Amino acid sequence: MEPYIHKVQYYETDKMMITHHSNYIRWMEEARVDFLEKIGYGFDRLEAEGVTSPVVSVECKYKATTTFPEDIAINVFVKEFKGVKLVLGYEMRKVVDDTLVFVGSSEHCFLDMGGKFVSVKKTNPALFEKLAGLVVE
């Protein structure tokens, strides 16, 4: 799957012209939205089918700095999925020289529109099969 490309914006940098660490979490979200769209289950479709998938936790490790106006390639992959919990992995690299700048993960659950936990395997078998088939061992 093609990576999501984010161009570092001027406002995302600090006085030293280095990207502020909090922005990487936003980039994870941008890349997750793009990933879900690419697999055919964008947020609009999920919500239309009565499912939300909030973030439960985030983990990240910064490997190198990024600066304005670098392009960053963000690869998203399924680390773990069993129908109730989804763990996505993220790897960010500078497009110009492939330098690894960030690795992280986000954990998500699935809720119905009333806020109750759901098993995707039971409520949306097609989505279950799609995500289960994308797990990277």
Image (cartoon, rainbow, N blue to C red):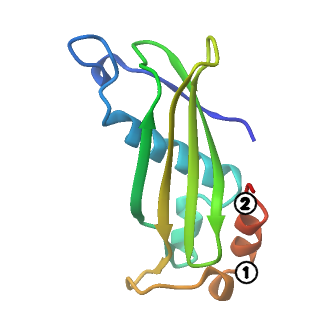
The residue located at (57%, 66%) in the rendering is 86
Q: What residue is pinned by disc 1?
A: 125
Check disc 1: other Cα within 10 Å, few if <14, some if 14-19, many if 20+.
Answer: few
The secondary structure type at the circle numbered 2 is: loop
User: What kind of residue is marked 1?
Assistant: Pro
Q: Quadrant of residue 116?
A: bottom left
Check disc 2: other Cα within 10 Å, few if <14, some if 14-19, many if 20+.
Answer: some
The residue located at (40%, 36%) in the rendering is 24
Q: In which quadrant will I find the C terminus?
A: bottom right
The reply, left or right, for residue 38 in relation to residue 90 is right
Q: Nearer the viewer, residue 95 or 115?
A: 95
For residue 5, above or below residue 124: above
Q: Quadrant of residue 123?
A: bottom right
Tell me where residue 48 appears, x and y as whole percent: 54, 72
Disc on the earlier residue, 2 or 1: 1
Tell me where residue 57 appears, x and y as whole percent: 39, 60
The reply, left or right, for residue 71 in relation to residue 75 is left
- The alpha-carbon separation of the residues under discs 2 and 1 comes to 16 Å
Q: In which quadrant will I find the N terminus?
A: top right
Kindly report which numbered mark, 2 or 1, lies closer to the viewer in this rendering. 2
Q: Quadrant of residue 80?
A: bottom right
The secondary structure type at the circle numbered 1 is: helix
Tell me where residue 102 appears, x and y as whole percent: 49, 33
Q: Which mark is residue 45?
A: none
For residue 72, above or below residue 118: above
Q: Which mark is residue 135?
A: 2
The reply, left or right, for residue 77 in relation to residue 19 is right
Q: Nearer the viewer, residue 61 or 17?
A: 61
The residue located at (42%, 66%) in the rendering is 54
Tell me where residue 125 appears, x and y as whole percent: 73, 81
**In the rendered picture of this protein, how many numbered marks are placed on residues?**
2
